[in-house]
Image (cartoon, grey):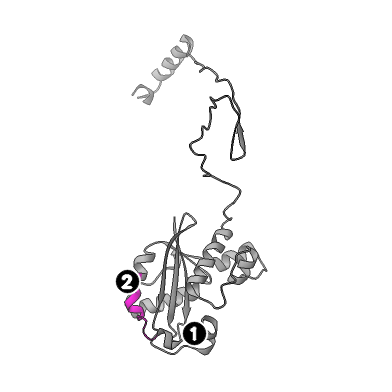
Amino acid sequence: MRHLVLDTETTGLSAAEGHRIIEIGVIEMVNFSVTGRSLHLYINPERDIDVGAQDIHGLSSEFLADKPVFADILTELTDFIKDGLLVIHNAPFDIGFLNAEFSRCGHTPLSMERVIDTLPLARQKYPGAQASLDALCRRFDIDNSHRDLHGALIDADLLATVFVELKGGRQPGLKLNDGTENEPSTNNVSGEDKNLSGFVLRKRSVRPARIFAVSDIESAAHKDLLAKINNPIWLC
């Protein structure tokens, strides 16, 4: 199962008013574990950035002036996310901006059917509680002290950890691989007790195999039953 945890930063709050994406961060997860693969892109929005938005993410027009425009990073983005499930906090915001950019490039829009929105997921699991990314980090004791400003890759990385917790957590007490996979799992032939991951294997005598023979009466009854069935598969 492949998830792509995604976040964006923008020039303002409304794609409908012509605001643009200026940063994209994507973290890849497979089977709810971060793989180490990520995508981080800065984008020239070809327009001014609202003062309120810049106060949130700290990205300026001067910094973005020499960055590629969205059309130049489109292929890199779509090749990375492919057909994986997108995990986004407050997905309508990011998907709205992405689809506005896709539309400008004549690209097929992203479907909400391939999106998992962690905001309603958190509100459903903790009704009445704050559901911002910072609030969820506090709830799950996730260190976000490095998040002085919003950043797409930083927020995607934090959201990946939050997403795992919302889906049930990693169960740290369950160790499936602690280096003992080569130890005997059923027979202890040394005569000594062994402690494997908290389980003590003790020496036991091996029971001889038991044979359950079919009697002549049972065999005859079985053949009689098969004779009453049309084309019984047990005769094939």
Toward the viewer: 30 or 167? 30
Residue 108, image x and y in percent? 34, 72
Q: Quadrant where the N terminus lies?
A: bottom left
| Mark seen at residue 75 | 2
Query: In what element is the residue under mark 1?
Result: loop
> Could you tell whether 216 is left or right of 194 in the image?
left
Q: Residue at x 47, y 88 (%)?
A: 49
Q: Amino acid at mark 2?
A: Thr
Q: Residue at x 40, y 79 (%)?
A: 100
> Could you tell whether 199 is left or right of 114 in the image?
right
Residue identified by numbered label 1: 12
Magenta-colored stretch includes residue 69 = yes
Query: Of callouts 1 and 2, which one flags the residue occurring earlier in the amino acid sequence?
Result: 1
| Mark seen at residue 50 | none
Distance, label 1 to label 2, CA atoms, is: 24 Å
Magenta-colored stretch includes residue 1 = no
Q: Which residues are magenta?
A: 65-76
